[in-house]
Image: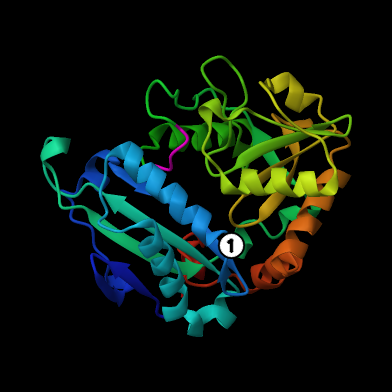
Amino acid sequence: MSKYVAYLNGEWIDSDEIRIDHRDRGFRTGDCVFDTARTFDGVIFNARRHAERLMRSLKYARLDSGLTTDEWEALFHESVERNKDNLKEAGDFYVYPFVTRGLGWPAPASGPPTVACIAYPLYFGRWSEWFDEGVKGAIPKTRGLSSDQVDPKIKHQSRMNMNLAEMEAWDIDEGAYPVMLDMAGNVTEGTINSVFLVSDGVLKCPTDSAILQSLSRWTVQDLASQLGIEVVQEDLQPYDLYTADEAFLAFTGPCVLPMTTVDKRSIGDGKPGPITTQLLAAWSERVGIDIVGQAKRYGEMGNPGHPDAPQSDRH
C-alpha cells in the first residue's frame, strides 16, 4: 500500500499516523464539519467552491479553523501536490478536509479545534459496475433532518439518521442506496448523494430547503442548462420516483450514477435513460476525463488500500 501524507494541526504527517483523541467532541458528539472534493487527472474540480462551502459550514457551526478561504483552497491543492507520486496508481484522489471543536465541555468552552486535510484514492470499485445497469434505490423510514434541527445545507458529521437509513435501505433491497424523505414526505437526498428524476423530458430535483448545498447537484443543473434541458426544482414524492421515466444520483466520486429501481420497482424501462447518459457525457467533456472508462479501468484493479475497500483488498 502506498504511503500518503496529510495535514493535521499545522503539520504534514503520514496519514496512517493521524489520531483523534477519544475525548475530542468530533468523535464523542459528531461536533465536526467537513467537505469532500475529487480530482480529475490530478486537478481538483471546483476547488474554490468547496473551500467556500466549507467556510459556510464552519460559520454556521460557529467553528474557527484559523484558516481563510484562500488558505483552505491552497491547502487542498497542497494535499494533492504532496501525494502526486501516488496519482498513477490511484487514478484520482478524494480531498477530505475536516474541523472538529476539539476537547472540552460544554461546547462554548471547548477547543482548540482539530484541523485536518487528507488526500486518498477514489474507490472506483464501489460504483464502476453500476454505470451500465444502474443502482438500486430504497426509501427508508428514517427521515432527513429538518432545518429546524440542524440545517442540512452544511456538511456535518452528526449522521446517525443517515447510518440508520442505510441499514433500512438494505432491509428493503440489499445493496440499495437510500432515498430519504423530509418530515412532510417529500424526497430530499441520499446519505452521500443528490437525487434527480426525469419526467416527460424535464429534469426534476427537490428544492434546497432540506438538502445539502451539493456541488454535484449544482454541476448537474449547470450542465443541463448548457445542454438546453429544462430543470425544475419542486417538492417531489415517492410517487414521482415510481412513475419517472428515468432517475439518477449525483455525487462526488462517480458524478452521475443511473438509478434504475426504487423499492424494487423499475424506473422507466429499468435501464439508464438518455438524459442521464447525456449529462454524464457532458460532465466527462467538462473535466477532460472519460469518467465511466476511468472508473471501469480502476474498478477492475480493486483500488487496494482504499478505506472503503473490503478488508481483503486492503493490502
Instruction: Name which residue type carries label 1.
Output: Phe
Classify 10 Å Cα crowding around label 1: few (below 14), some (14-19), many (20 and above).
some
- Position of the N terminus, as image quadrant, is bottom left
Q: Mark 1 — residue?
A: 45
> Is 273 in the magenta?
no
Question: Magenta residues, as a range?
Answer: 152-156
Across and down, in percent, residue 67 comes to: 30, 59
Residue 272 visible in the current orientation: no
- Tell me the SS state at disc 1: loop
Left or right: where 252 falls relative to 134 = left
Q: What colour scheme governs how the chains and residues are painted in the rendered image of this protein?
A: rainbow
**Quarter occupied by residue 193:** top right
Left or right: where 97 falls relative to 243 = left
**Quarter occupied by residue 275:** top right
Count every numbered label the image shows and give the total.
Answer: 1
Across and down, in percent, residue 281 comes to: 80, 58
**Quarter occupied by residue 160:** top left
Q: Is residue 171 above or below residue 42?
A: above
- Give the prevailing secondary structure in the magenta stretch: loop
Residue, far top? 184
Residue 113 visible in the current orientation: yes
Q: Nearer the viewer, residue 300 or 145?
A: 145
Q: Is residue 98 above or below residue 94?
A: above
Left or right: where 8 falls relative to 225 = left
Left or right: where 254 falls relative to 146 = right
Residue, far bottom? 85
Q: Residue at x 39, y 57 (%)?
A: 69
Q: Is residue 129 above or below residue 172?
A: below
Across and down, in percent, residue 152 comes to: 46, 33
Q: Residue at x 23, y 56 (%)?
A: 114
